[in-house]
Image (cartoon, rainbow, N blue to C red):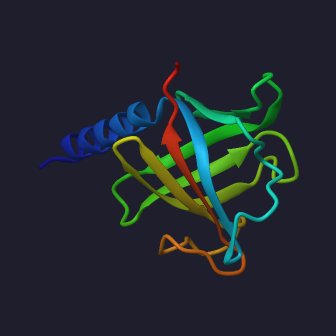
Amino acid sequence: MGITSAMNKEEHLIANEIEILQGAWQQIALEADGEVNPPDEHSVPGALCYFFGTQFSVRTPDGTVLIEGDFDIDPSAHPKRITWIDSIGPDAGKRLPAIYAIEGDHFIFVATDEGQPWPTEFKTVPGLTMRSFIRHKAS
C-alpha cells in the first residue's frame, strides 16, 4: 500500500468518526479525580453538547454557551484519542488530551490537563475527568 493510499484510509477514518459525533449529546454522568458526580462548571441540567464539523459547544436550554472550541481526533490510536481546544474559559487555547469511545448512541471521554500523558483507561484518578453522554433525539 502506498503512502497516498494509507493517508486516504486515515483521512476517511477521521472523517467517518467526525460524522458519527455530529449533532447533540446529553451528559448523563461525570466523574472527576475519582469522585462521582462532583460539582460541574461546564454543564447544568438540560445542557447539551453540540458537535458541528470539528467544533463543539455546550449550551444551556436557554442557549447560553458554557464552553466551546475545536477538537482533533485520532481514531486509529488505541484507545481512540481526542484533543479538546477550548476557545473560552480558563482552558482557552490549551490542548487537553483525552481518550474516547463511541458505541451506538453512547459517547464517553476521559480528559487530562495540557502537558499531561494521555489517559489510558476509562476511569479517573486525580487529574482526570470522565464524561458520559447519550445522543439527544429531539422530541
The location of residue 123, given as percent across then percent down, is 54, 74
The location of residue 31, given as percent across then percent down, is 65, 66
* Foreground of the two, 38 or 58: 38
The location of residue 17, given as percent across then percent down, is 38, 40
Q: How many marks?
A: 0
Asked if 77 appears above or below 11 in the picture, the reply is: below
Identify the residue at the far front of this view: 139
* Foreground of the two, 8 or 113: 113
- Residue at 33% x, 56% y is 76
Identify the residue at the far right of this view: 90
Tell me, yes or no, if residue 48 can be seen here. Answer: yes
Asked if 33 appears above or below 137 in the picture, the reply is: below
Left or right: 49 as drawn, with respect to 3: right
The location of residue 3, given as percent across then percent down, is 23, 47
Q: Quadrant of residue 7?
A: top left
- Residue at 65% x, 81% y is 125
- Residue at 30% x, 45% y is 10
- Residue at 66% x, 71% y is 128
Tell me, yes or no, if residue 54 can be seen here. Answer: no
Q: Quadrant of residue 61?
A: top right
Left or right: 80 as drawn, with respect to 114: left
Left or right: 115 as drawn, with respect to 4: right
Identify the residue at the far left of this view: 1
Identify the residue at the far top of this view: 139
Asked if 115 appears above or below 104 in the picture, the reply is: below
Q: Quadrant of residue 44?
A: top right
